[in-house]
Image: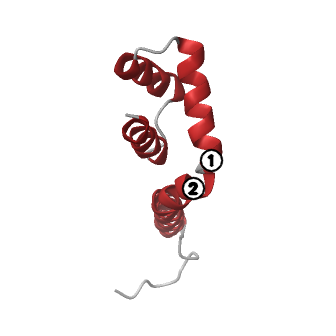
């Protein structure tokens, strides 16, 4: 039973689950009181910290990549907007002939 609940806790922690939700579900599955469930989650977290972080790394990388691409897209759109705003306000000097 201990290995089963430990693997369940590891899986949920790797997915960055809310600790309160995790403790609640551990208490439901094991019949432990809240404080005991909380202690069990903390114990598993401390014993397997490197494993949890290793499983979370791809998720963090993906989120970081998404942020960078969103920022680059926003700056690109802003730059194009500035270019179009400048082209609308450009006027030819008086007497100049516009060649089209």
Compared with 44, 97 (above or below) is below
Kind of element beneath mark 1:
helix
Circle 1 packing at 10 Å, graded few (<14), some (14-19), many (20+), is few
x and y percent of residue 84 in the render? Answer: 46, 66
How many numbered marks does the figure carry?
2
Residue occupying the far bottom of the picture: 99
Q: Position of residue 50 (x, y in %)?
A: 61, 58
For label 2, the SS is helix
63 on left or right of 47 = left
Pick the front one: 15 or 60: 15
Q: Residue at x 46, y 45 (%)?
A: 10
Q: Which residue is mark 1?
A: 47
Q: Quadrant of residue 41?
A: top right
Which percent across, then down, holds residue 37? 53, 21
Q: Residue furthest right?
A: 46
Q: Nearer the viewer, mark 1 or mark 2?
A: 1
The residue drawn where x is 47% and y is 48% is 14
Which residue lies under the disc numbered 2?
A: 53
Quarter that holds the C terminus: bottom left
Q: How is the image coloured?
A: secondary structure
Q: Is 46 on the left-hand or right-hand side of 34?
A: right
Residue 50 or 20: which is nearer the viewer?
A: 50
> Badge 2: how crowded within 10 Å, few (<14), some, or many (20+)?
some
Q: Quadrant of the N terminus?
A: top left
Specify which label sits upstream in the sequence, 1 or 2.
Answer: 1
Residue 100 numbered mark, or none: none
Of residues 44 and 56, the one drawn nearer to the viewer in this rendering = 44
Q: Position of residue 64 (x, y in %)?
A: 53, 60
């Amino acid at each position: 039973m201990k290995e089963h609940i430990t693997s369940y806790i590891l899986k949920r922690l790797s997915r960055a689950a809310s600790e309160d939700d995790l403790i609640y579900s551990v208490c439901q599955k094991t019949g432990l009181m809240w404080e005991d469930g909380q202690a069990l989650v903390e114990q598993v977290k401390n014993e397997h910290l490197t494993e949890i972080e290793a499983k979370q790394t791809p998720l963090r990388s993906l989120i970081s990549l998404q942020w960078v691409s969103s920022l680059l897209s926003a700056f690109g759109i802003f730059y194009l907007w500035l270019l179009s705003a400048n082209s609308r306000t450009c006027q030819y000097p008086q007497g100049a002939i516009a060649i089209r």
